Image (tube, grey):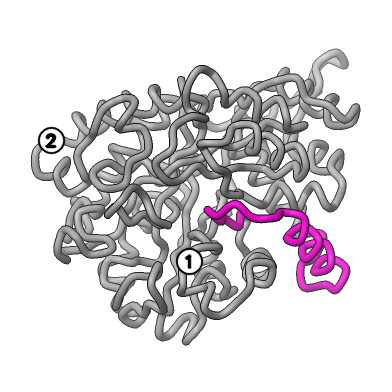
Amino acid sequence: MRGRTERPAPRAPSAARRPRGPGLLTAAVVGALVAGTVAVAAPALTAHSGPSAPAQPQAAPASVEQVTDTCSPMVTALSPRDRIAQRLMVGVDASDPAGAAAIVKGSQVGGVFLGGNATALLRDGRMQALQDASRTPLAVAVDEEGGRVQRIDELDGDIPSARQMAASSTPEQVTEIARTRAEQLRARGVTWNLAPSVDVSDKPRSSVIGDRSFSDDPDIATSYARAWAEGQQAGGVYGVLKHFPGHGSGSGDSHEGSVSTPPLAELEQRDLKPYAALVGPGTPLDGRIGVMLGHLEVPGLTGENPATVDPAAYRLLREKYRFDGVAMTDDLGAMKAITDRYGLAEATTRALAAGADIALFSNVTAVGPLLDAGEKALADGRITPEANDAAAARVLESKGLCSRR
C-alpha cells in the first residue's frame, strides 16, 4: 500500500489468554447489538491484568455471575453477513469525511483504513461521525511506522524511520516515541496502527523494506519492535506486527508484482525469529497484538501462492508459533502480487477461507460485492460458520469489546 509521495507502505492458541475489555462495556455493547444500535465509541485498549485467578473450591454467591467468554454472545447477536463485515477493513478517503461515514453506515464493516496524504478526517473530531455510523465500535487504522511511512507527520510532526530509531535511540526511548505517537493518533480517532515492522533486512534504505526494518540482526529487530509495540499499546493503540513470514529477504516489491522469499527453513533461522520471540504463549506480546501476513511466496510452505491466501501460512502462524490473536492480510486491493491474479471479491474470499481474520484493502470500492461473496462462501462451505464465528470473535476482542476466555 502506498504512503505519501515516494513513501511505499504496505498496508501495515494460547491456553492461558488473559481477559481484556471492561465487563460493563461488553454488556452494554451486547445489549445494543441485540437492539440494533450502539451508542459508544471504540474503547481505549487496556493493559493486561494478568492471568485469571484459579477457581475457588466453593461456589460463588448467586449474585456474582462467572463470565469466561464474553465474545460469543456478541458474535451470536450479529447476523452472518455482519460477522463477515467485522472481518473487513476497508479503505476510505480521508479527504471525504461524509463519504467515509456513508461507507461505514452502509456496510457495517469492522474497520476502516486511512491511507494517502489527506488529513481532513483526522481534524476537528470528524472521526466521531464514523463511530456514530457503526452499530459496533469501529477499528480505525493507519500505517504510522515513521520515516517514509507516516500519516500524521503534517499534523503532529515527523518521526524517524525504524532504522534511524534503532541507530540513534535506546529501546526505552523508542517506547516513549511510540507512546507519544499513539496518544496523538488516539486523540485524532485512530485506534489501530499497522506497525511495527519486524522484517529483518540489510537492504538499501529506499528498497521496499529498507529503512522500515529496525535491523538486519533478528535479536535487535525483536528488541526494538517490542519496544515500539509496548509503547503504542501504552498510548491506547492496537498494533500489528508485519510482514509474516518475513519480507526482509524477499525478491522484490509486492506492490509491483510477485515476491518470493528464501525457503521456509532459511526463514526460520532469521526472519521468523522475532515472531517466535514475541507472539506465542508466555512471550511479551502474547494476546496484545495482531500479525499481518505479506503477499509472499514461500518455497517449502506456500509454493507459488501468496501467503495471504494460502492456508499453510496461517497454519504455520497458528500451530508452530501458537499465535491466537488477529491475523490479517496485507492490502488486497492495490498490490499487484494479488491484483494481477484475482479480482477483489475473489481475493477477499480466498483470504478469509484460508484463515485470515481480517481482509484489508486500501482502495475505496463497493463493499456490498465483498459481503455478497463472503455470504456465498459461507453457503458453499468455503468458509465454515465455526471458522467465521471464531474470526469475528478475535476481531471483537482485538477492539477491546470482550474476552474469549
Callout in the foreground (2, 1): 2
Depth order, front residue of 251/345: 345
The reply, left or right, for residue 341 in relation to residue 170 is: right
Callout 2 amino acid:
Ser
Residue 98 lies, with reference to residue 318, above or below; the image says above
Which stretch is magenta?
358-386
At 52% across and 53% down in the image, what residue appears?
362
Q: Where is residue 264 in the image (x, y as percent from the top left)?
A: 37, 78
Depth order, front residue of 97/22: 97
The reply, left or right, for residue 198 in relation to residue 347 is: left
Q: In which quarter of the image is residue 257?
A: bottom left
Depth order, front residue of 221/375: 375
Residue assigned mark 2: 169
Residue assigned mark 1: 320
Residue 325 appears in view: yes
Q: How crowded is mark 2: few (under 14 residues within 10 Å), some or many (20 or more)?
A: few
Q: In which quarter of the image is the C terminus?
A: top right
Farthest residue toward the left? 168
Magenta stretch: residue 236 in it?
Answer: no
Q: Quadrant of residue 234?
A: top left
At 53% across and 44% down in the image, what residue appears?
113
Q: Quadrant of residue 98?
A: top right
The reply, left or right, for residue 311 in relation to residue 188 is: right
Q: What element carries label 1?
A: helix
At 39% across and 55% down in the image, what residue appears?
2
